[in-house]
């Protein structure tokens, strides 16, 4: 059953194997209420109507497929392990699950209802046999999956986070990256550091901000944050219809 009551949500993964590992600490989620809109919980009825597909930014097929094609082009194979951090309702996760060997896809998100929506999507797609490891967690604790990852993906996550949350995420990622692991992330790029003015981006006309959601960062700011976490940064460039840029973090 894909829907978890509030009592049981945080204590189980989608395959039910690691209840202790899935228990979420309550550390930063209260603070996140003032950061972005993702503290809002969808109801079972809203999920059954597919409203989660809009809640995570719409362009459901296009953006999900783009993430999948991107990582496959970067060498992702079915037997490797992937952590989709800020996975939402598995817009990309469904594609990864279809492709990857059972048990190799892990998704983590702060929003329990989006993880429920992800389970709903898995059922609709007939992919329950792929044993997705899904976890609600508000502190990016990827080590709770108890595995090392060849790939980590954060698609449209850093666009919703302050820099200190990004550093927390990168520090947690560093703990679980395989020696040659790659952490790909999208972000809205500012032309220089400390760019206080709002930016209207080219294609979608999305407006981003220095100090509120959705956030923009210069590549130098992101490189600095990654350095705090002991990671190297490389800018890849344009990748999707949302005006965001892709970059990759590796172990320094
Ligand atoms: C724009 S959606 C993208 C979701 C997914 N990556 C996709 O492409 O469909 C942003 C996601 O980041 C999640 N998120 C926001 N703040 C978070 C945090 N502090 N920890 C984990 N996930 C977070 C939201 O709940 C939401 O699912």
Image (tube, rainbow, N blue to C red):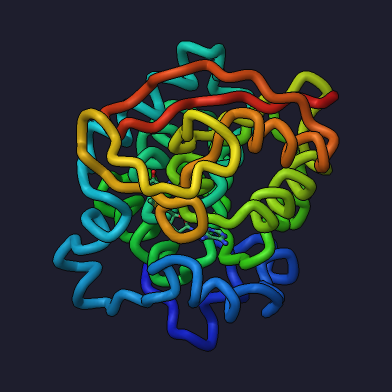
Of 54 and 191, which appears nearest the observer?
191
Q: Is residue 161 visible?
A: yes
From the image, which quarter does the C terminus lie in?
top right
Apparent side of residue 98 relative to residue 33 in the rendered image (left or right)? left
Of 132 and 184, which appears nearest the observer?
184
Apparent side of residue 1 relative to residue 194 in the rendered image (left or right)? left
**Residue 140, x across and y down, in percent:** 67, 56
For residue 151, which quarter of the picture?
top right
Task: Give me the residue at 26% from left, 44% from top.
Answer: 206
Q: Is residue 143 above or below residue 183?
A: below
Task: Give me the residue at 54% from left, 22% from top.
Answer: 78
Task: Give me the residue at 47% from left, 43% from top.
Answer: 216
From the image, which quarter does the N terminus lie in?
bottom left
Q: Is residue 193 above or below residue 31?
A: above
For residue 68, which quarter of the picture?
top left
Going by the picture, which residue comes out furthest to the bottom? 7
Task: Give me the residue at 70% from left, 31% from top.
Answer: 223
Q: Is residue 99 above or below residue 37?
A: above
Q: Is residue 104 visible?
A: no
**Residue 171, x across and y down, in percent:** 79, 47
Of 216 and 226, which appears nearest the observer?
216
For residue 11, which quarter of the picture?
bottom right
**Residue 80, x across and y down, in percent:** 63, 25
């Amino acid at each position: 059953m894909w829907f978890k009551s509030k009592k049981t949500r945080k204590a189980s993964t989608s395959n039910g194997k690691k209840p202790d590992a899935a228990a979420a600490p309550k550390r930063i989620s209260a603070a996140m209420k003032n950061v972005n809109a993702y503290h809002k919980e969808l109801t079972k009825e809203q999920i059954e109507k597919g409203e989660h597909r809009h809640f995570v930014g719409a362009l459901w097929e296009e953006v999900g497929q783009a993430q999948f094609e991107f990582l496959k082009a970067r060498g992702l194979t079915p037997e490797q392990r992937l952590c989709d951090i800020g996975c939402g309702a598995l817009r990309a996760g469904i594609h990864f699950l279809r492709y990857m060997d059972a048990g190799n896809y892990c998704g983590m998100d702060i929003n329990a209802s989006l993880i429920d929506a992800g389970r709903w999507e898995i059922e609709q797609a007939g992919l329950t046999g792929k044993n997705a490891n899904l976890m609600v967690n508000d502190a990016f604790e990827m080590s709770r999956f108890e595995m090392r990852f060849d790939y980590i993906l954060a698609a449209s996550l850093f666009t919703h986070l302050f820099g200190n949350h990004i550093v927390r995420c990168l520090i947690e990622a560093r703990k679980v990256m395989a020696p040659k692991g790659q952490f790909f992330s999208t972000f809205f790029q500012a032309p220089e550091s400390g760019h206080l003015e709002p930016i209207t981006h080219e294609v979608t006309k999305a407006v981003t901000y220095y100090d509120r959601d959705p956030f923009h960062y210069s590549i130098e700011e992101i490189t600095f944050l990654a350095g705090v976490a002991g990671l190297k940064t490389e800018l890849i460039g344009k990748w999707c219809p949302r005006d965001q840029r892709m970059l990759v973090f590796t172990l320094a």
